[in-house]
Image: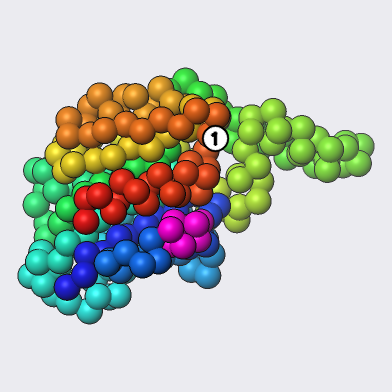
């Protein structure tokens, strides 16, 4: 069986997020799977707000359905897992499950190598500010609905969302808005020491969404990891540096 490279996209992205990486690996001896995560691309959003664990559960179920093999067959399959931003958050969850106390074979799958591209999941004061901002945005909508202030509503909403940098929140449905709050509130730092699979971490030095400090922390706490930093690159490291990521993957096949 060919090795499988399973790629999980970031918040607001889709399977098209990996167009450049697919092109770079088009002649590699592996199968590339790039699902749309629930709520993005062509995949319907969840019926209720999800957590990162529920996204991880969905990925496991999707992989079983896609490969149409049993848990035993999956254990014999070489799977390389790559996640960008929110997809990286999910990938960390899945890798940590392999060494957690909960040994439920239905909740994880074997990972031969992990690739994290500007992975989300490290919570710091910036995230607390963001969550407060989401609440402020809700409150602001209430005040702007008061008669006399309604004419200011369009400009007021834009100001509130810009103030707390939550444009992705503005565009989302109520279910996905709460999902964004749920996943942003969780700190995955305590799980990083459970990730024992070999890991390559890719980060742009100019990333304003997930700062380089997050990548340095992940590299420090994931023992078998190597950090690759790209000067001047922002959050789209998986696209801008697809050729460099492809080179690392090919060397490990």
Magenta span has 20?
yes
- At a point 46% along the width and 32% down the height, the residue shown is 230
Q: Position of residue 179 (x, y in %)?
A: 47, 49
Q: Kindly state the secondary structure of the residue where label 1 is placed.
A: loop
- At a point 16% along the width and 43% down the height, the residue shown is 197
Q: Name the residue under label 1.
A: 234
Q: Please, which residue is most extreme toward the bottom here? A: 68
Q: Is residue 185 visible in the rendered structure shown here?
A: no
- At a point 83% along the width and 43% down the height, the residue shown is 154
Q: Give the range drawn in magenta.
A: 17-24
Q: Main secondary structure of the magenta part?
A: helix
- At a point 92% along the width and 37% down the height, the residue shown is 148
> 178 left or right of 223?
right
Nearer the observer, 142 or 192: 192
Q: Position of residue 153 (x, y in %)?
A: 83, 41
Q: Is residue 61 above or below residue 55?
A: below
- Quadrant in the rendering for residue 115: top left
Q: Is residue 150 visible in the rendered structure shown here?
A: yes
> 79 left or right of 85?
left
Q: Where is residue 249 in the image (x, y as percent from the top left)?
A: 29, 51
Quarter of the rendering occupied by the N terminus: bottom left
Q: In this view, does 219 lie above or below 20?
A: above
Q: Position of residue 88 (x, y in %)?
A: 37, 45
> 157 left or right of 100?
right
Magenta span has 222?
no
């Amino acid at each position: 069986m060919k090795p499988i490279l399973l790629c999980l996209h970031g918040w607001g992205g889709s399977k098209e997020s990996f167009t450049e990486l697919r092109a770079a690996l088009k002649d590699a001896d592996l199968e590339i799977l790039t699902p749309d995560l629930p709520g993005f691309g062509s995949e319907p959003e969840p019926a209720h707000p999800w957590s990162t664990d529920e996204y991880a559960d969905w990925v496991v179920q999707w992989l079983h359905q896609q490969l149409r093999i049993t848990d035993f067959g999956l254990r014999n399959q070489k799977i390389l897992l790559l996640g960008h931003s929110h997809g990286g958050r999910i990938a960390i969850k899945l890798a940590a499950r392999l060494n957690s106390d909960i040994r439920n074979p239905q909740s994880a799958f074997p990972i031969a190598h992990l690739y994290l591209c500007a992975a989300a999941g490290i919570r710091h004061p910036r995230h607390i500010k963001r969550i407060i901002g989401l609440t402020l945005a809700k409150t602001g909508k209430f005040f702007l609905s008061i008669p006399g202030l309604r004419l200011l509503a369009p400009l007021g909403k834009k100001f509130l969302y810009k103030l707390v940098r939550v444009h992705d929140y503005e565009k989302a449905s109520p279910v996905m808005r709460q999902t964004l709050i749920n996943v942003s509130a969780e700190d995955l730092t305590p799980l990083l020491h459970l990730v024992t699979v070999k890991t390559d971490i890719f980060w742009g030095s100019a990333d304003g969404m997930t700062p380089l400090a997050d990548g340095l922390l992940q590299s420090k706490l994931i023992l078998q990891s190597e950090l690759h930093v790209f000067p001047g690159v922002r959050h789209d490291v998986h696209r801008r540096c697809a050729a460099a990521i492809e080179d690392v993957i090919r060397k490990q096949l």
